[in-house]
Image: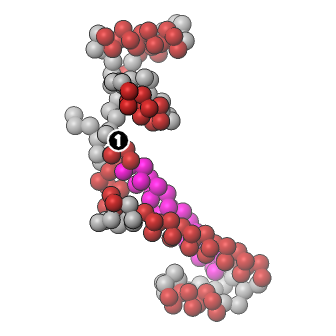
Amino acid sequence: MNECAGIEGDYETLDEHMDVTLANPSKTRVIADAKVKTDRVDSKVLAHLLRANLVAESYVPPKDVRERRDLVRACKALVEDRTREKNRVRAVLKRTGNQYSRELFGPTGREFRAELTLSEVDRAVLDAHLAVLQNIEENAHDFSRVEDIKSSNCYCKIYLVNQSSGPSR
């Protein structure tokens, strides 16, 4: 199998039923330099290279590591989304001249936001961003129920551990 983006589902399906070798295309020059480029020809060349043990294999981590990496990527995306929404809330407050020097998203910040006098449009925009932020927080909280991250913070430790897990060379 030739490595490319989006191959994970195909790899897992095939790996359940047979021994799969994932070839690194940048290191398999014979195929790249071929004059005739079809899947059929490429498959035959890969089969010959594999029989001669000349295929540059790509590392594929075990299924549990791949799953943890997916979880980490999802957590990371939620953190990034949360940060974007908080910045949008701050931008609305700054634009309306209502900056707050303390923790804007804690209990006192909640009181401050509730007491703000804003136009109907600005209140609707602020409330929309806060609703999205609350949804993100709830989703991030759901991740804490997953066994892999119960003992660590979804936003830090697991990211470092799982992104560094790779082949031993």
- Find residue 72 and report its image quarter: bottom left
| Residue closest to the far left | 169
Q: Look at the image and give the residue range highlighted in magenta.
A: 68-94
The colouring scheme, among rainbow, by chain, secondary structure or one colour, is secondary structure
* Rendered-image quadrant of the N terminus: top left
* Rendered-image quadrant of the C terminus: top left
Q: Is residue 73 magenta?
A: yes
Figure label count: 1
Which residue matches tag 1? 63
- Find residue 111 and report its image quarter: bottom right
| Residue 68 in the image, given as x and y percentages of width and height | 36, 51
Label 1's element?
helix
| Residue 41 in the image, given as x and y percentages of width and height | 49, 8
- Find residue 158 and report its image quarter: bottom left
Query: Which residue does the image show at 33% across and 46% down from the upper left?
Result: 64
Q: Judge left or right: residue 32 versus residue 162.
A: right
| Residue 7 in the image, given as x and y percentages of width and height | 47, 33
Residue 119, placed above or below residue 74? below
Residue 62, placed above or below residue 73? above
Amino acid type assigned to the residue bearing label 1 in the image: Lys
Visible residue check, residue 25: no
SS assignment for the magenta stretch, majority: helix
Residue 158, placed above or below residue 153? above
Query: Which residue does the image show at 61% across and 87% down from the upper left?
Result: 113
Query: Which residue does the image show at 63% across and 79% down from the upper left?
Result: 94
